Amino acid sequence: MAKGDDLEDRLIRFAVMIIQLCDRLPPTPAGRHVAGQLLRSGTSPAPNYAEARGAESKRDFVHKLRICLKELNESRVWLKMIGIAQLLLREEVLPVYRECDELCRIMNTSVQTAQSSD
């Protein structure tokens, strides 16, 4: 398995978790809005990470990793909103939130490592 495959697979599994969670959101105006936003932000880190792995330069690599981090941070906020607004049960949201938080930490470390390695 190539370096980075584990993280890419984890980001794909996270995207699937997001898709499944969004399918369970209520069909209300709020539920549809949050689902649309979360689907965009929560499914984009995996393909953006794949793009980063094929980056043309270190600068391009760091830029694409930052996009992944930005989207994960946005997803974390939407997941928090779902919990606070009680659009789903806490037990449904918490595992997805925890995975998102952990992925944010991993991606943040990856960005810092990539920037400092010369």
Image (cartoon, rainbow, N blue to C red):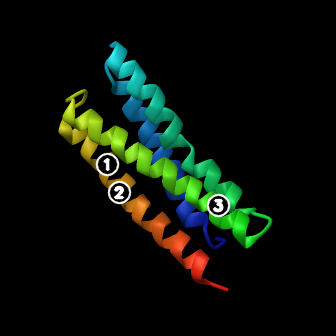
Secondary structure category for the residue under label 2:
helix
Amino acid type, label 3 = His
Q: Position of residue 53 (x, y in %)?
A: 69, 64
> Which is closer to the viewer, label 1 or label 3?
3
The extreme right residue here reads 56
Q: What x and y, as percent, mark residue 62? A: 63, 66
Could you tell whether 49 is left or right of 81 in the image?
Answer: right
In the image, residue 48 sits, relative to residue 61, either above or below, namely: above
Q: From the viewer's perspective, is the residue at label 3 or at label 2 nearer?
A: 3
Q: Is residue 63 above or below residue 39?
A: below
- Residue that mark 3 sits on: 63
Identity of the residue drawn at 53% across and 71% down: 110
Label 1, label 3: how far apart the Cα atoms are:
24 Å
Residue ID for mark 1: 97
Tell me the CA gap for discs 2 and 1: 6 Å
Give the position of the N terminus as an image quadrant.
bottom right
Q: Are marks 2 and 1 in contact (CB under 8 Å)?
A: yes
Sooner in the amino-acid sequence: mark 3 or mark 2: 3
Q: CA distance from mark 3 to mark 2?
A: 20 Å
Decide which of 115, 94 is in the foreground and name it: 115
Determine which residue is flagged by label 2.
101
